[in-house]
Amino acid sequence: MLSVIEGSRILVTGGTGSIGSEVVRRLIERGASHIVVLSRDDSKQFYMQQEFLGHNNVQWVIGDVRDRESLLRAFQRDIDHVVHAAALKHVLISEQNPTEAVKTNILGTQNVVDLARATGVKSVLMVSTDKAVNPTSTMGATKYVAEKLALDGNSLATRCACVRFGNVLGSRGSVIQQLCSTPKKEGGFGFQI
């Protein structure tokens, strides 16, 4: 995989999220020639830009995978590979907002795959979840469909694959993070790790 990364131009959707930002760090370490970070959160982009001062090979694009026009701006950088980490990942939030989960996780993934194929991207790696296995929630169901769309995007020119994560230790919204940051209440308990 290192040989694929070295010298490549890589787009990371959801690049300021828990997984996306770590992907960006690892791509820098492994010699990507250019990294485009797509995110719709300007505050997270601001703080990440401060972290990566001096890395002239990182470019920042405010955009949303749900909006093909803003997504296309990110693809107009001669992208070789895409790591698609943009998602609504919280089970409860997706249950409360199923239309938004469909727009981001399903339609957003279709947009990424379509534009990757249209612009000659070599590969798309979609970040999914263990909740896509026999889904029982809106989030799991939308990620399951997103996986199918990503895999359906395979062609001779563009290879598409998915990777499933479980509960990532310390990521925003993870069970472990919530337990670690729960304030101790009268008669209650808090966890420290």
Image (cartoon, helix red, strand yellow):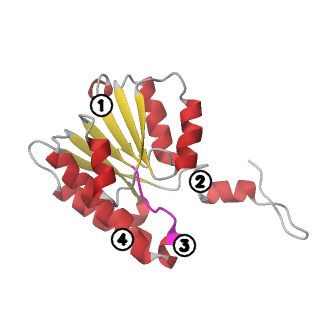
Q: Residue at x 19, y 54 (%)?
A: 114
In the picture of the structure, the residue carrying the numbered disc 4 is: 102
Instruction: Report the span colored magenta.
Output: 85-93
Q: Name the residue tied to disc 1.
A: 9
Q: Position of residue 54 (x, y in %)?
A: 52, 21
Q: Which residue is mark 2?
A: 172
Horizontal arrangement in the rendering, residue 143 relative to residue 46 (left or right)? left
Q: Earlier in the sequence, mark 3 or mark 1?
A: 1
Q: Secondary structure at mark 1?
A: strand
Q: Which disc is residue 92 wearing?
A: 3
Residue 166 lies left or right of residue 142; in this view the side is right
Whole-angstrom CA distance, mark 4 to mark 1, is: 29 Å
From the image, state whether disc 2 or disc 1 is nearer to you.
Answer: 1
Question: Label 1 near label 4: C-beta < 8 Å?
Answer: no
Say what amino acid the circle numbered 1 marks: Arg
Q: Of helix, strand and loop, which mostly describes the magenta segment? A: loop
Please name the amino acid that badge 2 sits on.
Answer: Arg
Mark number, residue 128: none
Q: Is residue 186 visible?
A: yes
* Image vertical order of residue 103 relative to residue 53, above or below: below
Q: Please give the name of the residue rendered at 32% of the width and 60% of the height, measured from the top-left corner.
A: 108
Residue 85 spot, x, y in % from top left:
40, 50
Q: Quadrant of residue 176?
A: bottom right
Cα–Cα gap, marks 2 and 4: 21 Å
- Across and down, in percent, residue 98 comes to 43, 76
Residue at left offset 26%, top offset 49%: 161
The numbered mark, 2 or 3, whose residue comes first in the sequence reads 3
Q: Identify which residue, 112 or 144, lies in the foreground.
A: 112
Q: Are marks 2 and 3 in contact (CB under 8 Å)?
A: no
Q: What quarter of the picture does the N terminus occupy? A: top left
- Say which of marks 2 and 4 sits in front: 4
